[in-house]
Amino acid sequence: MPDNISAILSASAGPVAIFTDFDGTLVEIAPSPDAVIVPADLPQRLERLYGALDGALAVITGRTIADIEGFLPHQDFSVTGSHGAERRHDGEIEDPDPDHIAGARHIAKALTHHLGEEAGILIEPKPTGVAVHYRAAPEKRAEVERIVERAVAGVSGFHVIEGKKVVEARPVGTDKGEAIRALMTIVPFKGRTPVFIGDDVSDEDGFIAATDLGGFGIKVGQGETAARFNLAGTAEVHAYLDALAERIAARAANQPAQSQEESMVK
């Protein structure tokens, strides 16, 4: 087992809650949002981890809940989508703020007007935000940033964030850190050590929140970060999650025998 995974497992000694990003963390980043390839063994891996953690597993993503349900159907873990503006917990989906929905539609209309015909630009409307992808036209970054900033300036309560070849408009006060803080107040997350795994600039809020709450972040890939640990890529993320689930299962299997030994000593 790589030393970095062993170190993370050592830090995950007690009951943990796992929060993880999707793109670039559980799956490889694709040329476009709908081109993501979900590894065949990922659903089973997440089901096993969810069981080992007694349900304390959540995907925290900039994608919509509908996107995650499309890529990973029939999963019971919690999902916080659109950077915290959407939430599914215990099978129930909370309705987004109507003002956020209206603001996102207004911004999407403006961006479609200015960028809808631009080659290599993909506009992705979300229930409470809009993402503009320029992965196929990286030379247009400055233009995209300028136009998104202008569109957001006319809508109260929204701001702009940047990610890997994407500029996104989202409601103020919704970020992955706040999503983690909210989930950590409810069962089955409450009382556990939070661990957040992510790869992008938008995940830094999550790393900070996990640290503030007594846990830590895991950065996937290189770059300056508030995360305590680093993993090279999605393969190492999968290896860590598998090792964590296996360790929890092994401890559970040994627990009855240990209890019997303790009673015999007494």
Image (cartoon, grey):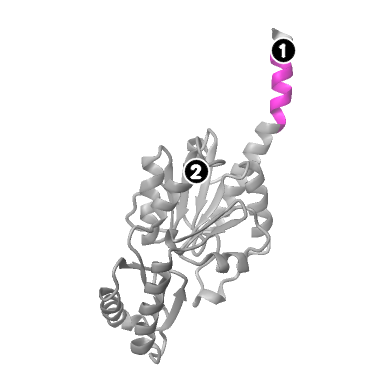
Query: Local crowd at mark 1 within 10 Å, few (<14), some, or many (≥20)?
Result: few
User: In percent of the image, x 36 and y 61: which residue is there?
Assistant: 201
Farthest residue, direction top: 266
**Is residue 3 or residue 45 the one in the foreground?**
45
Farthest residue, direction bottom: 117
**What residue range appears in magenta?**
253-262
Residue bearing mark 1: 263
Question: In the image, is 129 to the left or to the right of 262?
Answer: left
Q: Secondary structure at mark 2?
A: helix
Q: Is residue 254 above or below residue 215?
A: above
Question: In the image, is 144 to the left or to the right of 255?
Answer: left
Residue bearing mark 2: 3
Q: Mark 2 is on which residue type? A: Asp
**Is residue 165 or residue 69 the one in the foreground?**
69
Q: Secondary structure at mark 1?
A: helix
Question: In the image, is 43 to the left or to the right of 84?
Answer: right
Q: Horizontal and vertical percent for residue 217?
A: 42, 47
User: In percent of the image, x 69 and y 26: which residue is there?
Assistant: 255
Instruction: Confirm whether residue 112 shows in the render.
Output: yes
* Magenta region, main secondary structure: helix
The verdict on residue 255 being magenta is yes
Q: Horizontal and vertical percent for residue 166?
A: 38, 73
Q: Mark 1 is on which residue type? A: Ser
Q: Nearer the viewer, mark 1 or mark 2?
A: 1
* Circle nearer the N terminus (1, 2): 2
Please say if the residues under marks 1 and 2 sit with CB atoms less than 8 Å apart: no
Quarter the N terminus occupies: top right
User: In percent of the image, x 54 and y 52: which residue is there?
Assistant: 58
Quarter the C terminus occupies: top right
